Amino acid sequence: MPEPGDPRKTPQGVPYADLKHIVNADGLHLFCRYWEPEAQPRALVYVAHGAGEHSGPYDEIALRLKELSLLVFAHDHVGHGQSEGDRMIIKDFQVYVRDSLQHIDQMKAQHPSLPVFILGHSMGGAISILTASERANDFAGVVLISPLVQMNPDSATPFKVFVAKVMNQLAPSLPLGSIQSNWISRDHKKVEAYDQDALNYHGGLRVSFAMQLMGAVERIQRVIPAIAWPFLLLQGDTDKLCDISGARLMFEQAASADKKLKLVLPLASCSLRLIQLRPAFHELSDLIRPRIMSSPLNPLSGGPTTTVK
């Protein structure tokens, strides 16, 4: 939260004293956003954004959730957006999980009786899976939008992975290829908006960061069989950034009896702009609505496993 007299500033030069923020365990300031309903909130929803972006593009979907009397909150991850930290450099992927749990715990302390949901996109989906897996009984449900569950086999070939491991020892900050913005959306206006957003990271993906992503994926694949919490997977049908095989793997192998996979057919790839997922918003609300009157420690189950295509 804002601290009067704090001299620290965002990478864009704005004093954190003028902004909502938290300070993580490493002493880094993380810029926060909150979408509070006018009525008494019925649940908390934590949003985890993807790699190279920030929490701002989630405004539209957060406003839609706010209409359901949900209190939505998010922060820019370390090294992203308006938060401190070297751009797209992370010493350990667990930092993202730790910071997420810190923010969630702070909000739960303010609203101890409310159920908690997580919504994660792309890399934020990986963060969400690991976060929920650390506190399996704490969450009423998890929404995963084109989550990073498996590396794209075209870009993570055995040879490329071997080279990345070698380069991580020799030159961990070496930039690899950047995200192709035309993979993000079929809508040229959204691609242009992404390219012009100064808070997005437009440089190359660093070797060390790629290795952290691969490590996170390995962790996720180990925990998937034990996942028992309710979840909804929304996945682009021809995704080039977050491979669809990962969503299928999670859906098929997770132990949860309350799970759903929805293929969002109009998507060319996993969209970093969630406004493209408006056609699937009813799927998201269908997960949350039945649970907002139940305890997060005893979420309602939706019955048998269902796949929607």
Image: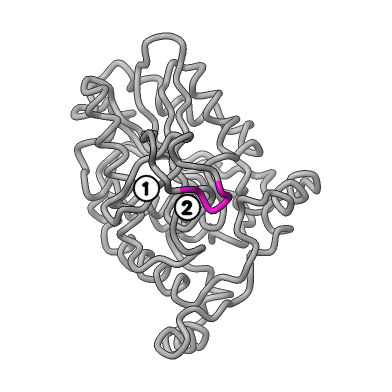
Give whichever of 134, 225 is nearer the camera: 134
In the rendering, at what x and y percent does residue 61 appear?
56, 31
Q: Which residue is mark 2?
A: 147
Q: Which residue is mark 1?
A: 128
Disc 1 secondary structure class:
helix
In the rendering, at what x and y percent does residue 268 appear?
69, 52
Disc 2 marks a residue whose amino acid type is Pro
Q: State how the image is colored.
A: one colour
Residue 263 appearing in the image: yes
Q: Is residue 161 left or right of residue 127?
A: right
Q: State the image quarter where residue 300 is shown.
A: top left
At horizontal 45% and vertical 67% (from top left) the residue drawn is 89
The reply to whether dot 2 and dot 1 touch (C-beta < 8 Å) is yes
Residue 248 appearing in the image: no
Residue 193, compared with residue 38, is above or below; it is below
Residue 220, compared with residue 229, is above or below; it is below
Residue 3, compared with residue 14, is above or below; it is above
Q: Return the disc, 2 or 1, that comes first in the chain's sequence.
A: 1
In the rendering, at what x and y percent does residue 206 appear?
52, 74
At horizontal 42% and vertical 32% (from top left) the residue drawn is 73
